[in-house]
Image (cartoon, grey):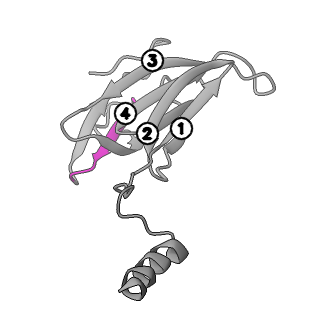
Amino acid sequence: MKKIFFLPALFLFITGLSLVHAQPPVAYEHQYMATIGGETLLTWMGEGLTPHIQYYDLNSDGNEELIVVANGVIFMLGNEGTIENQQWKLLKKISCTINPYNGVAFGDLDGDGDPDMLAGKKNGRLSFLRIPGLHKTLYLS
């Protein structure tokens, strides 16, 4: 009788199994942050998610702005410094909670001479965003 009890206990001890302290698996997410000039401008959560990053001259001033799509949100940043001493400032943040954005493309889609933006969504649809290009301040309509 003692041998029957001893063998299962020895098996549990050797394999490290414990029926009393069993824990369910835990899913971990990583938090990503983009810090520019000592200020955290972008944060997003995910498992191995990488942002879509692109440069484009949004306001036709001859300087390219930085466009980042992360966690479904479009961030547009302008460099107020020089090439050697970059000082990025958040110009615009566009969120869409129903069908989040996952990428952007730029061009003059309506033929008015100003840059326009197509934003791809995770559901496969595109959003058309007009960007008047002759203003120092970025406006979207």
Q: Decide which of 137, 14 is in the foreground and name it.
A: 14
Of the residues under marks 1 and 4, which one precedes in the sequence? 1
Q: Amino acid at mark 4?
A: Val
Pick the front one: 31 or 62: 31
Q: CA distance from mark 1 to mark 2?
A: 6 Å
Which stretch appears magenta?
114-123
Q: Are marks 3 and 4 in contact (CB under 8 Å)?
A: no
Asked which quadrant contains residue 23, the reply is bottom left
Q: Which residue is mark 3?
A: 134
Q: CA distance from mark 1 to mark 4?
A: 14 Å
Mark 3 and mark 1: span between their CA atoms? 34 Å
Q: Earlier in the sequence, mark 3 or mark 2?
A: 2
Number of the front mark, 3 or 2: 2
Residue placed most toward the observer, 94 or 57: 94
The total number of labels drawn is 4
Q: Residue at x 44, y 45 (%)?
A: 29
Q: In this figure, which residue is indicated by the disc labeled 1?
A: 32
Tell me whether circle 2 and circle 4 mark residues in contact (CB < 8 Å).
no
- Residue carrying label 4: 73
The answer to whether the residues at label 3 and label 2 have Cβ atoms under 8 Å apart is no
Inspect the image, locate mark 1, and give the three-letter code of the amino acid beneath it.
Tyr
Furthest-front residue in this view: 1
CB-based contact (under 8 Å), mark 1 and mark 2: yes
SS for callout 2: strand
Assess whether mark 1 and mark 3 are in contact (beta carbons under 8 angstroms): no
Q: Residue at x 45, y 35 (%)?
A: 44
Q: Earlier in the sequence, mark 1 or mark 2?
A: 1
**Residue 116 lies in the magenta-colored region:** yes
Q: Is residue 82 magenta?
A: no
Q: Is residue 38 visible in the rendered structure shown here?
A: yes
Which residue corresponds to the image point at 62% horizontal and 26% vertical from the top-left? Answer: 35
**Where does residue 7 sit, x and y in percent of width and height?**
44, 84
